[in-house]
Image: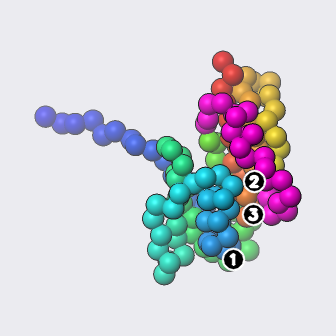
């Protein structure tokens, strides 16, 4: 009897300039844990709950532009204001990232916009419906 494949998740693969810096940022700011690492390939996979992100170190200008101008992810959460209370002290004083605090969007969500040190944009989103 055939079985129906079940998709367990999705993980963007993001080009970064410095894998060590990226791992530290996601660990220290966003509480992601390192799950898989291949130092020889400058590759790391990290997760927080059901959210997975993979990173590959690539110092080329093309990779940097792709990450900073053409790549984004949306991280769905509940209790965005509670999350913000936890994130804000970790982000205060940092000059290696950009953040827009929680704000309501006209289409019914509340979001935090966070650009990591490579310019990778994460929309942290809570549905307001």
Residue at image point 51% right, 44% down: 49
Q: Is residue 111 above or below residue 129?
A: below
Q: Position of residue 27 (x, y in %)?
A: 61, 59
* Sequence-earlier tag: 1 or 3: 1
Q: Are marks 1 and 2 in contact (CB under 8 Å)?
A: no
Label 1 vs label 3: CA separation?
15 Å
Q: Quadrant of residue 80?
A: top right
Look at the image and tell me in which quarter the C terminus lies: top right
Label 3 vs label 2: CA separation?
14 Å
Q: Are marks 1 and 3 in contact (CB under 8 Å)?
A: no
Look at the image and tell me in which quarter the N terminus lies: top left
Q: Is residue 35 magenta?
A: no
Left or right placement of residue 128 versus residue 55 in this view: right
Per the image, label 1 sits on a secondary structure element best described as loop
Q: Nearer the viewer, mark 3 or mark 2?
A: 2
Q: Is residue 39 above or below residue 16?
A: below
Left or right placement of residue 40 versus residue 74 in this view: left
Q: Which is nearer the eye, 82 or 71? A: 82
Q: Which residue is mark 1?
A: 60
Disc number for residue 96 = none
Residue at image point 66% right, 59% down: 28
* Sequence-earlier tag: 1 or 2: 1
Q: Nearer the viewer, mark 1 or mark 2?
A: 2
Disc number for residue 90 = 2
Q: Position of residue 103 (x, y in %)?
A: 81, 32
Q: Is residue 5 above or below residue 35?
A: above
Q: Which residue is mark 3?
A: 117
Decide if residue 96 is in sight here: yes
Residue at image point 61% right, 35% down: 77
Residue range of the region highlighted in magenta in the rendering: 76-98
Q: Position of residue 118 (x, y in %)?
A: 73, 64
């Amino acid at each position: 009897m055939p079985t129906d494949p079940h998709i367990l998740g999705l993980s963007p693969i993001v080009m970064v300039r410095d894998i060590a810096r990226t791992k530290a940022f996601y660990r220290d700011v966003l509480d992601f844990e390192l799950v898989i690492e291949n130092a020889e390939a400058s590759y790391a996979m990290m997760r927080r709950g059901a959210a997975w992100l993979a990173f590959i170190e690539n110092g080329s200008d093309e990779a940097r532009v792709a990450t900073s101008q053409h790549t984004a992810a949306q991280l769905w959460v509940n209790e965005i204001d509670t999350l913000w209370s936890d994130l804000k002290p970790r982000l205060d004083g940092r000059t290696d990232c950009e953040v827009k605090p929680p704000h309501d969007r006209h289409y019914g969500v509340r979001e935090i916009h966070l650009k990591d040190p490579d310019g990778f944009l994460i929309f942290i989103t809570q549905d307001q419906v």
